[in-house]
Amino acid sequence: MSVNADVYYIDFGNRISKRNIGGQTVFYNQGGVIFKGVEGEGTFQLTHSWSIYANGSVNSATFHNQPDPTQNGLTIANSPAATAAGGLIYDHHGLYAALLAKYVGPRWGDDPEFFHLAGYATAQLSASYTIPRSGDRPAIKLTGTIDNLFDEHGVDALAGYTAALGTPLVWNIVPRNFTLQASVAF
């Protein structure tokens, strides 16, 4: 079994951020931010071949020492309230398979607390087999992955705004996709 946890508090003085307006990226100093939270993760080996994995966090990232005092205490953009991941892993005699899920909690797309983004969850199924080295032939690894297994279609992030009307533009979660890969170790 492997377990780890931490508690953090970071008082950060000069957070640089960017805003995309009509294709133009502008960088600026947002001032102070306090990051704090609790994180933990663990892997437990059930048998010689099977393991379970879990990870989670509760987070906070809020403005402080702002030129506009009404922004103090507001949550910064892209800072999820919580995250989680977990799954089942099989690893034995060159065969590896994993079913892993990830959750990203609710967050704001822009500062200060503008454009609310809902939480979402995705899952990934992957499997690989390594053909061991034999004589002059190197080891060969064949891998297949299905990402976004359940085809979640939510919003991932705020991409920026249109130049003319300031309409929000968003990035959606990438639809279900498949990857096949072969690699050779020399």
Image: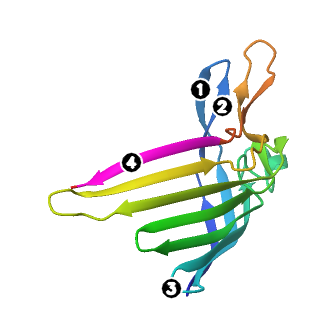
Residue drawn at 49 percent across, 73 percent down = 91
The residue singled out by tag 2 in the image is 19
User: Please, is residue 16 above or below residue 163 in the view?
Assistant: below
The extreme front residue here reads: 135
Position of 168 compared to 37: left or right?
right
Q: Position of residue 112 (x, y in %)?
A: 79, 43
What element does badge 2 sit on? strand
Residue 184 screen position, x and y as percent = 29, 52
In the rendered image, the quadrant that contains the C terminus is bottom left
- Give the Cα separation between the discs numbered 3 and 2: 50 Å
Residue picked out by circle 4: 182
Q: Closer to the camera, 183 or 75?
A: 183
Q: Main secondary structure of the magenta part?
A: strand
- Secondary structure under tag 1 reads strand
Q: Which residue is mark 3?
A: 48
Q: Could you tell me the amino acid type at mark 2?
A: Arg
Residues at badges 1 and 4 in contact (C-beta under 8 Å)? Answer: no
Q: Pick out the residue farthest to the left.
A: 136
Secondary structure under tag 4 reads strand
Quick one: label 3 or label 1, which is nearer the N terminus? 1
Residues at discs 2 and 1 in contact (Cβ within 8 Å): yes
Please tell me whether residue 124 belongs to the stretch shown in magenta.
no
Q: Is residue 88 visible from the viewing direction of this image? A: yes
How far is the residue under mark 1 from the one under mark 4? 38 Å
Amino acid tagged 3: His
| Distance Cα–Cα, label 3 vs label 1 | 51 Å
Q: Which stretch did the figure color magenta?
A: 177-185
Callout 3 environment at 10 Å: few (<14), some (14 to 19), or many (20+)?
A: few
**Where 125 sits versus 170, above or below?**
below
Residues 144 and 33: in front is 144
Q: Left or right of 118: which side holds 103?
A: left
For the view shown, which residue lies furthest in the top direction? 164
